[in-house]
Image: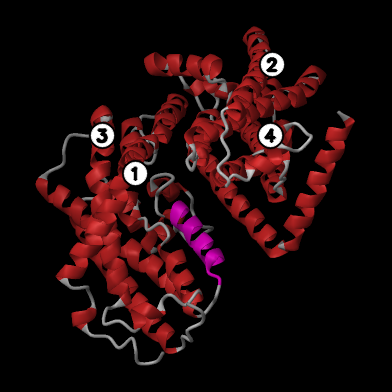
Amino acid sequence: MVRYFQIFGTFVVASLIRDMTFRLNFVLECVTSLGWMAMNIAFYLLVFSYTSEIGAGSGWTKPPFFVFLGTGLIINAIVQAFFMPSAEEFAEMVRTGGLDTTLVKPIDAQFLLSMHRVKFSAFANGLVGVALVAWGVSRLDTAPTTAAWVLYPLMLACGVAILYGFIVMLAAATILMGRNQGLYDFWFYITNFSRYPAEIYTGPWGGPLRMVCTFVLPILLVVNVPARSLALPIGTGDVRLIIAAVVAAAVMLGLSRLTFQAAINRYRSASS
Amino acid sequence: MSGMATFSWQQLLPSWHGWTTMLSINVADRLAHRGDFFVGTLFRFLPIVTQIFLWTAVFSAAGSELIAGYSRNDFVAYYLLTMMARSFSSMPGLAGGIARSVRDGSVKKYLVQPIDYVGFLMAARVAHKLVYFAIAAAPFGLMFFLCRGFFPPLPEVPTIAAFLATLVMSFLLGFFLEATLGMLGFWVLEVSSLIFVYMLAQYLLSGHMFPLDMLDSITLSSSGYSLGDLVQLLPFQYTAYFPCAVWLGKIQGQELVSGLLVEAVWVVVAAVACRIAFLRGTRRYSAFGG
């Protein structure tokens, strides 16, 4: 295990050197992602100039909602920084046969393939996410309890684990499909449902959709559970959601492992 | 390369044979991945699902039937219509492609041939859009049919005609704005930052994210003008907001007529800017690589 941490440390250093070699590109990447994110924040500020809450009686007034928004940014920044760049390279490795070299190395293939590249510019949005959470928490009607502060990083980790499971399964699909150019598109459409509080999914269509996105594709648990644990008072229903998030994280990690192993077993080298 | 790009109206557009050839190439290219394309277009409507729930939730707490003059259903219809408007006005890869062809020298093959580069690009885009709509009509039709309950009753014929005119002009405006941006590649080697700023402005100020009427409530200090008034002075609104607002009946009568005229003026201004940028750019162009 220690060896894996050391190797991961080497990946981090190598990626940092690579990013800093093209410093202007790094700055532009940061500015680009900050620009899109600023636009989203502006949009929600505009929405809150017309309403005090998103969903009547949902509790998602402006400060809690910005905790939600910040939490989403933090989770996405972690995923985009640590896992997404490797997953994007994975598709190309399958297509070109470059995967062969990786598979013969004396190290776990999933670890190597899903974590070998770190994109530091993705942390820019994460830092803004932290600032949004801090701003939102400072304006909450009731300050978070100690239990909420303990739960928050744990639930963040569960959210990241669920998304990591999705990424690995999508990447594994590359082996089965031969090409996976739509990986990023799929990612966008799946995560789109996690960008809003679960309370907005109500009514004859929203209710079933909420159940599916919570218990079948647990995408709604990713941001909702950590954000709720910090921004809203913890109720009986929340305990069930917290348990669901922990179980979903474990299941997604296990399932992604099985999917990845099955895909690797079906891999036939594309190189000559 | 001075003198190669002398302009003549006959060269403005490719010949009929050129048009049909480019069209058949684009048709073949698109049809090769028709299944992927169909599913991809359908997937693009998924965010509309979350928008429906988001605006329903916003309205449930807003305590008003209308926000900036739009009902909940208007908002959903607006987002669906922006997808249609953007499919006319968006020009993915146009500016970057022009700048790249200048940078790597491949633009010179257009300069030495008896065709007009801008006309060629326009013909390729028209072909691309025609094929796009031929295939995307099914997913678009399906989504509009499923969401028909969100739309107001069908507008009268003049409004529909005005809507179609705004869509055609939004295509032309989008094309000439992006082409002009790409032509800046004759002066600066790397235009990706400029493209980013343009995309950002376009996304925010075109009404792609929200109806621009929502900005009317934000007043600018003591001037008496709102942010909405300022945005109305820019051309971006015609690439998304304006066509949608016309269909939904938010812009009518004299306001509609003057809006169409201003849009036409913007198209002419952008076309002239593009032509000037091309002529000036080719005068200072030195063919590298290729």
How far is the residue under mark 1 from the one under mark 2? Answer: 40 Å
For disc 3, the marked residue is: B144
For disc 2, the marked residue is: A246
For disc 4, the marked residue is: A136
In the foreground, B208 or B191? B191
Q: Which residues are magenta?
A: B190-204
Please state the chain letter of the residue tagged with numbered disc 2 in the rendered image.
A
Front of the two marks 4 and 1: 1
Q: Are marks 4 and 3 on the same chain?
A: no
Which residue is the extreme one toward the bottom? Answer: B3
What amino acid is labelled 2 in the image? Val
- Tell me, for residue B69, which label it has, or none: none
Residue B249 showing in the rendered view = no
Q: Residues within 10 Å of mark 3 (few under 14, many from 20)?
A: some
| Marks 1 and 2 in Cβ contact (< 8 Å) | no
Residue A184 showing in the rendered view = yes
| Marks 4 and 3 in Cβ contact (< 8 Å) | no
